[in-house]
Image (cartoon, rainbow, N blue to C red):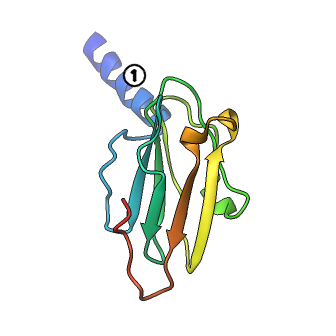
Amino acid sequence: MRFATILVSVSLSSVACGGSTSTTPTSPTEAPINLTASGLSSAVINLPSGGRVHFFNMDTVNHQIASTSCPDLDTPVLAPGTDSLRPQLTGPLTCSYDDALNASATAFDGSVTVNAPGQGGGAGY
């Protein structure tokens, strides 16, 4: 019986943590970005129209992505080990963002360029 209780606890904690910590794109239009102690894994992203950005907090502190130019990039506070898959972005557009919780840390400043429909993209990550 103790074994069953442990399995249930592990399953629930995996769901509560916000999902996987893998940074492998699930499709060619998904750009993974790791937030680490040293900054972003990719500061400049190029996506096709309809692409999505997936932020992973691989750091030991909270982060919160914010964009004044593209609110669709805004994330909730990301605790260590959590992630946030942002909605599809339709181009053409260019979005800049930073970490609202670490605004003076330029290592967390980035940009996403979304190409016009039919123009491809994705080579920037």
Rendering quarter of residue 95: bottom right
Rendering quarter of residue 104: top right
What amino acid type is highlighted by mark number 1? Answer: Ser
Residue pointed to by mark 1:
9
The residue at 56%/80% (across/down) is: 92
User: Percent from the top left, x then y, of residue 48?
Assistant: 43, 76
Q: Is residue 96 left or right of residue 3?
A: right
Q: Is residue 53 visible?
A: yes
Q: Secondary structure at mark 1?
A: helix
Please state which of residues 76 and 10 is positioned toward the viewer in this rendering: 76
Rendering quarter of residue 67: bottom right
Q: Is residue 103 left or right of residue 23?
A: right
The crowding category of the residue bearing disc 1, from other C-alpha atoms within 10 Å (few below 14, some 14 to 19, many at least 20), is few
Q: Is residue 1 visible?
A: no
Q: Is residue 113 left or right of residue 124?
A: right
Quadrant holding the C terminus: bottom left
The residue at 59%/29% (across/down) is: 62
- Count the labels in the image: 1
User: Percent from the top left, x then y, of residue 7?
Assistant: 31, 23
Quadrant holding the N terminus: top left
User: Percent from the top left, x then y, of residue 30?
Assistant: 39, 62
The residue at 32%/56% (across/down) is: 25
Please state which of residues 4 and 13 is positioned toward the viewer in this rendering: 13
Residue that extends furthest to the bottom in the rendered view of this protein: 118
